[in-house]
Amino acid sequence: MPYVNIQVTREGVTSEQKARLIKGATDLLVEVLGKNPMTTFVVIDEVEMESWGIGGLPVEQFRAKDPVSLK
């Protein structure tokens, strides 16, 4: 019974994108580990920007400091 938790910053992730993430994670577990998709759980948590940090900084400050960083 696999459980996958995907956390992203709250920046307008669409329902379609979430559905694709759920399907992709499930398909990967089926393909790689032979897991049953009916017992595979995928949860997506959206985290407020001020609650996410990178390199000791809130993500918005980190991005401002390093504009090439991933969003």
Image (tube, rainbow, N blue to C red):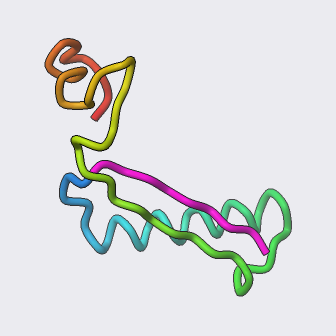
Q: Residue at x 68, y 67 (%)?
A: 3
Farthest-out residue, left: 64
Quadrant (top left/top right/bottom left/bottom right) for the N terminus: bottom right
Magenta part mainly helix, strand or loop? strand
Q: List x then y, in percent, for residue 43.
A: 51, 69
Magenta part of the chain:
1-9
Q: List x then y, in percent, for residue 64.
A: 14, 19
Q: Residue at x 18, y 12 (%)?
A: 65
Does 61 sit left or right of 27 as displayed? left
Is residue 9 depicted above or below 4 in this figure? above
Q: List x then y, in percent, for residue 21.
A: 47, 63
Q: Quadrant of residue 19?
A: bottom left
Task: Report the number of discs.
Answer: 0
In the rendered image, residue 10 lying in the magenta stretch gets the answer: no
Q: Quadrant of residue 10?
A: bottom left
Does 20 sit left or right of 33 as displayed? left
Quadrant (top left/top right/bottom left/bottom right) for the C terminus: top left
Is residue 26 depicted above or below 13 in this figure? below
Farthest-out residue, bottom: 38
Q: List x then y, in percent, for residue 25.
A: 59, 62
Q: Residue at x 25, y 51 (%)?
A: 48
Is residue 67 depicted above or below 58 in this figure? above
In the rendered image, residue 2 lying in the magenta stretch gets the answer: yes
Farthest-out residue, right: 34
Is residue 59 depicted above or below 28 in this figure? above
Farthest-out residue, top: 65
Does 4 sit left or right of 21 as displayed? right
